[in-house]
Amino acid sequence: MTDYSSLADDFYVNLNLNTEMALPAARETILGFFERIQKTYPTMRNFYTRESGDFVLEEDKEQGTYRWITIEPRRVCSGYVNPPNIEAALEQHKLVMELIPYMLSVSPLDCEALDFMLGFDYSYRGNHDALVAEALGTSPAMEGLIDIPGSQVINLEPSMTVALDDSCRLQARLMVETRTNAYHVRRGDYPEEQISVYFTIRQYGSLAPGVTFDETLLKLREHSERLLNQHVIDQLLRPLAQAISAK
């Protein structure tokens, strides 16, 4: 099994369920759901409400590894930052998927989209976009722009989404997010920020009759690991890490 944590400075495993209908927001319902989560993960004791109205339950972040869960008006999110292994994150996400039909009244019919996402963050002080161009290259059609005398790359965030079935309901998306802006380049002063790589497998639409959320989660996880190992790690993650190390 691949040790994903060794591929980046920070690694996280997120699950997002987007619903067609608004989720319950009653005090008893929200607290009952989070109290049930807390029974399994007692260290998740930080509960608060954002100005947006989102409800959050999370662990302390000081150690650099922590769990978090949010309930938004039409979305339930579950994440684990720097888990000891991917199975630990899957156990948390599976618990959430098992509880929401009964405690939040979410039916498989109510699924707008279900995402399983692996994220990788790389700390780097410098021009993120130039580094991405160096590590990953660009298409031949764009290489001429980089060769313009005196030019500097200030925005390069490769992204691609592909359909994995004929109905286009199952999709994979690979995205690179940089955090350098024109102000940093103009001054030549770069804060140490993180370059992020997100690899998401998304299932659109209501689930098939008899199919549960946790069963769908396991299917998305299988697709994610297979495609990541075959098409992302050696082609993108390792070249990016090596380019940063060379600096």
Image: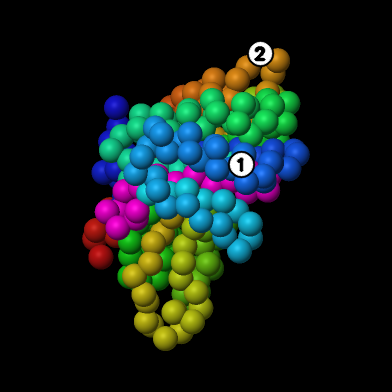
Residue 224, percent from left and from top:
47, 31
Single out the residue that lies furthest toward the top: 210
Residue 48, percent from left and from top:
51, 56
Q: Nearer the viewer, residue 43 or 161?
A: 43
Mark 1, residue position: 28
Q: How is the image coloured?
A: rainbow
Single out the residue that lies furthest toward the left: 246
* Residue at 68% from the left image edge and 25% from the top image edge: 108
Q: Nearer the viewer, residue 40 or 236?
A: 40
* Residue at 56% from the left image edge and 57% from the top image edge: 49
Which quadrant, please, contains the N terminus?
top left
Amino acid marked by disc 2: Gly
Mark 2, residue position: 210
* Residue at 46% from the left image edge and 84% from the top image edge: 186
Which range is magenta? 60-75
Count of number-bearing discs: 2
Residue 21, percent from left and from top:
75, 39
Q: Nearer the viewer, residue 134 or 54?
A: 54
Q: Is residue 102 magenta?
A: no
Task: Give the class, few, some or many, for how many residues have Cα within 10 Å of label 1's Cα (few <14, many ≥20).
Answer: few
* Residue 149 visible in rendering: no
